[in-house]
Image: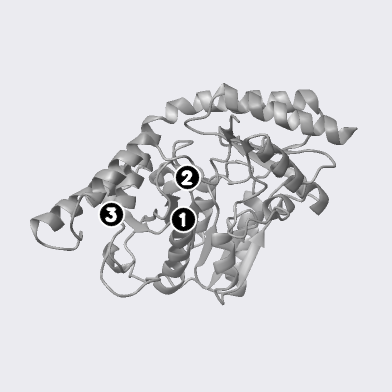
Amino acid sequence: MNSSYLDYNATAPLRPEARAALLAALEAPANPSSVHRFGRTARGIADIARGQVADLVGAEARRVVFTSGGTEANNLALRLAIEGAGVKSLVMTGIEHDSVLRPARHSGLPTYEVVAGPDGVVSLAALEATLGAARAAHPGPALVGLMLANNETGTIQPVAEAARFAHAHQSLLLCDAVQAAGKIAVNLSQLDADFLTLSGHKLGGPTGVGALITRDDWTPAPLLRGGGQEKGMRAGTENLSGIAGFGAAAAAAQHGLYGMKNVAGLRDRLQAGLLEACAEAPVYGADGPAGRLPNTLCIGMPGVAAETQVMALDLAGVAVSAGSACSSGKVTPSHVLTAMGLPEAAAREAIRFSLGWASTTADVDRAIEAWVKLWHRKRK
């Protein structure tokens, strides 16, 4: 049976460039921390990748700290803000990824959460008012968490504006750019974020590698202690093959940004095909002022549970997700959609299609056919 993989926001297929770099790095027989020539060769591989990742987001290579993925990068950023900068409160949005929300809620610091509007965009006025209230109640700097693009709806958030007023309040901003990087242009200087996080497998790199990129130098506050790797922020021998694959994927994604126009065209074809069959199907996150990621479509099938849709599409050879992928594999109501004000019943009916560098018209048409068949069957 032919199949269509439309779950790039969970994990993008490995790019050929990343595969080649990963396999080549596996041949390097040394620890990057070793001082002999083999170690220097391994270090050179890591340095090239560090530069490739930095170039993707317009940062300095020395600001890149490699981690095991976006989750660790977000956790490390929170620790640096709390232990390194001494923030006294946290202001998070309700649409953040769980790797930001959960450690924030368990940090021991007062944590304020701001919901998004019906268009999926966080109100700057609400965010600034909440930040002001947090600083009034807990004098001292705060950390604002605002992702660049949501992983479920694709909605692009006003990060640069949020960073401007965060800094005006002598506070910091964490930008989770995991979903945005490689799909839209990302520039750390323009965003003016203090911390920016990335994940390799969202770009078409290998799993198990990500990065934290900082605007300034920070006193290390590592999650893992031991060696002095990654500027003392992450102990342990570097995952050289993963880092090499991550770097190559970052370079390929940067060069392929122009191709995202074609991906957007495929996404729009998919959306039009579904709405032609079911005009009342709600599309979430498409109406924000800055738009959404060119590859993402979050749509509901009225009266049909997301879990039913995911399983039916899977049987038809189409891979999609209901909300954010999680380790348990369970389908639960999207916290992102409920933070946008949707009733739980509606949130339970939404699924996410996400396309990418290898998606084709055939993939889209197969998805339309499977979804429409399910809709007609359930409607009867």
Q: Along the horizontal axis of the image, is 337 left or right of 211?
A: right
- Residue 133 visible within the image: no
Res 240 label: 3
Find residue 319 and report its image quarter: top right
Q: Position of residue 153 (x, y in %)?
A: 64, 42
Q: Secondary structure at mark 3?
A: helix
- Closer to us: mark 2 or mark 3? 3
Res 70 label: 1
Which residue position is annotated with label 2? Answer: 202
Q: Position of residue 135 (x, y in %)?
A: 57, 69
Q: Position of residue 257 (x, y in %)?
A: 43, 30
Question: Closer to the N terminus: mark 2 or mark 3?
Answer: 2
Classify 69 as above or below 157. Answer: below
Q: Identity of the amino acid at label 1?
A: Gly
Q: Secondary structure at mark 2?
A: helix
Closest to the observer, 379 or 151 = 379
- Closer to us: mark 3 or mark 1? 3
Q: Position of residue 267 (x, y in %)?
A: 61, 28
Q: Quadrant of the N terminus?
A: top right
